[in-house]
Image (cartoon, rainbow, N blue to C red):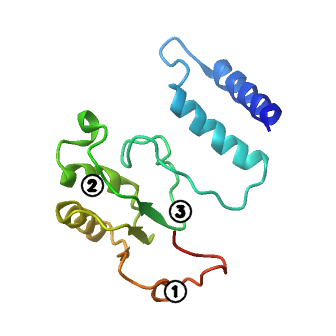
Amino acid sequence: SDQKFCEYFWQVWRLLEDSCTETQGMPAYFRFLTLMGFYVFVKEEVDAAVIEVGLGGRIDSTNVVDEPVVCGIASLGFDHTELLGDTLAKIAREKAGIFKRGVPAFTLGQEPEAMASLEQCAAERAVEFLRPSRAVGEYGLQAGRGGGLA
């Protein structure tokens, strides 16, 4: 509700404001909302959450979850090239920064250079990389029973 959002917003704002120093001020807006989201998850005793990155993987403020259940990368395009890179391979490498050792990851169909970069990053981090051509049952997930793929 709007009321709960406002309550949590100001709770987090005051907590952060109290911890500001001369050299460390308030976080940028997206980082603030990320912190607030995690705060709400704890306060509301959320069992599971889907957390979407904002800018990219490696440098994104959401990339603080050490042991996610799964990581996913949507279709890649030429967004934020000044930070993520000027080729799909570079952008894919940055997005793959969300991959965690031993945590399965999946993606949609990608351009060949992007897919090759994602596969390389997955191999470097010992990530089981699930490709989109498989049927849901091949992933060990049962649709509608605690798992599924969109």
Percent position of residue 40, x then y: 72, 43
The residue that mark 3 highlights is 68
The residue sitting at 34% across, 52% down in the picture is 95
Q: Earlier in the sequence, mark 2 or mark 1?
A: 2
**17 sits left or right of 30 in the view:** right
Q: Which mark is residue 140?
A: 1
Q: Amino acid at mark 3?
A: Pro
> What is the CA distance from the residue labelled 1 to the residue labelled 3?
17 Å
Q: Which mark is residue 92?
A: 2
The residue sitting at 70% across, 49% down in the picture is 41
Q: Earlier in the sequence, mark 1 or mark 3?
A: 3
Observer-side mark, 1 or 3, equals 1
Circle 2/circle 1 CB separation < 8 Å: no
> What is the CA distance from the residue labelled 3 to the residue labelled 2?
19 Å
The residue sitting at 18% across, 42% down in the picture is 86
Quadrant of the rendered structure where residue 105 is? bottom left
Q: Amino acid at mark 2?
A: Ala
Q: Secondary structure at mark 1?
A: loop
Quadrant of the rendered structure where residue 96 is? bottom left
**134 sits left or right of 64 in the view:** left
Q: Is residue 25 above or below residue 99?
A: above
> What is the CA distance from the residue labelled 2 to the residue labelled 1?
26 Å
Percent position of residue 30, x then y: 52, 32
Circle 1/circle 3 CB separation < 8 Å: no
Q: Is residue 80 above or below residue 130?
A: above
